[in-house]
């Protein structure tokens, strides 16, 4: 766990009331230096000069949502290692898991208590960089560990699918297709639960096509395999886009997405 100082916070929210309350809560109550932005484009222009220690981003914003903004900021070499906390009204387990998988160090649910916002931010920061935890933090850490484990398995299972599909041709492909179906079925059931609904959707499609091929009486040909390969490529793209959009912040756990 690496010790880092927190003083400069970039707060981005399209709601003027949230911006006003957030600025007062973080500056006057919390004693932080705060830069306020109303949209993603504004944040992209102002963040490099401000050099924040922490990004506090609303998820649901028009034109550029908080996740896209974080991915864009993470491509800037001047601020690519800045940790992020997402603010959202949608803070159920699948959403929280997804944000943690993206590299967030925490999630704050709307509506939040303005007088407790600074302490909440400090608690999340301390958990990440000072090793301090409370009961809620223990739950978040368990979720983070589950996400990391799932990510590792997803990468392994995707590699397994690639290996299996390379063997799918000819009359003796039935056993291989059964294994493809088994892996796809597992991922179809687990992806959405871990905040990756697209993984579930693609793997359901992969399972359906595999079923069709298993039910045909003719030998499996290369054009049959070509129906499956694009789905694997789409899974690879999801892994690239949903895993950390840059280097993970110091002290955060890592991993590529699982399968």
Image: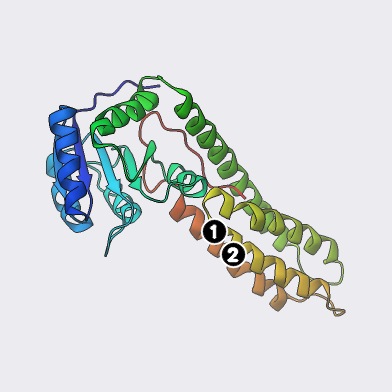
Which x, y percent locates residue 154?
A: 60, 48
| Quarter occupied by residue 100 | top left
Coloring scheme used: rainbow
Apparent side of residue 149 relative to residue 107 in the rendered image (left or right):
right
The residue lying toward the viewer, choosing from 202 and 226, is: 202
Quadrant housing the N terminus: top left
- From the viewer's perspective, is 178 left or right of 142? right
List x then y, in percent, for residue 194. 55, 48
- Give how far apart the Cα atoms at labels 1 and 2 are: 6 Å
In this image, 18 relative to 103: left or right? left
With 218 as the anchor, is 104 left or right in this view? left
Q: Residue at position x 86%, y 72% from top?
A: 171
Q: Could you tell me which secondary element the residue under label 2 belongs to?
A: helix
Nearer to the camera, 15 or 180: 15
Picture layout, residue 215 above or below residue 173: below
Reading the image, the residue beneath label 2 is 201
Instruction: Say which mark, if any, is on residue 259.
Output: none
Task: Return the x and y of residue 71 as percentages of the image width and height.
Answer: 33, 51
Disc 1 to disc 2: CB gap under 8 Å: yes
| Mark 1 surroundings within 10 Å by alpha-carbon count, few (fewer than 14), some (14 through 19), many (20 or more) | some
Q: Residue at x 50, y 26 (%)?
A: 138
Q: Which residue is mark 1?
A: 197
Tell me what residue is drawn at x 23 percent, y 51 percent: 13
Q: Is residue 8 above or below residue 100?
A: above
């Amino acid at each position: 766990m690496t010790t880092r100082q927190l003083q400069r916070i970039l707060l981005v929210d399209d709601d003027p009331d949230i911006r006003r309350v957030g600025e007062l809560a973080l500056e006057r109550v919390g004693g932080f230096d705060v830069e306020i932005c109303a949209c993603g484009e504004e944040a992209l222009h102002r963040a490099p000069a401000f050099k924040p220690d922490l990004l506090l981003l609303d998820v649901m914003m028009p034109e550029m949502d908080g996740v896209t903004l974080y991915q864009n900021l993470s491509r800037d070499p001047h601020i690519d290692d800045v940790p992020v906390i997402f603010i959202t009204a949608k803070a159920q387990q699948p959403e929280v898991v997804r944000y943690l998988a993206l590299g967030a160090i925490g999630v704050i649910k709307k509506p939040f208590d303005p007088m407790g916002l600074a302490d909440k931010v400090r608690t999340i920061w301390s958990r990440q960089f000072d090793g301090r935890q409370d009961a809620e933090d223990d739950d978040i850490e368990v979720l983070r560990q589950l996400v990391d484990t799932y990510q590792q398995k997803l990468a392994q299972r995707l590699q397994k699918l690639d290996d299996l599909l390379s063997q799918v041709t000819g009359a003796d492909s039935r056993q291989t297709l059964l294994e493809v179906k088994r892996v796809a079925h597992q991922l179809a059931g687990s992806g959405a639960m871990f905040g990756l609904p697209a993984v579930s959707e693609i793997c359901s499609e992969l399972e359906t096509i595999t079923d069709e091929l298993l039910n045909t009486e003719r030998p499996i040909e290369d054009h049959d395999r070509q129906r499956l390969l694009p789905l694997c490529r789409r899974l690879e793209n999801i892994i690239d886009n949903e895993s950390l959009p840059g280097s993970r912040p110091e002290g955060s756990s890592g991993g590529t997405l699982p399968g």
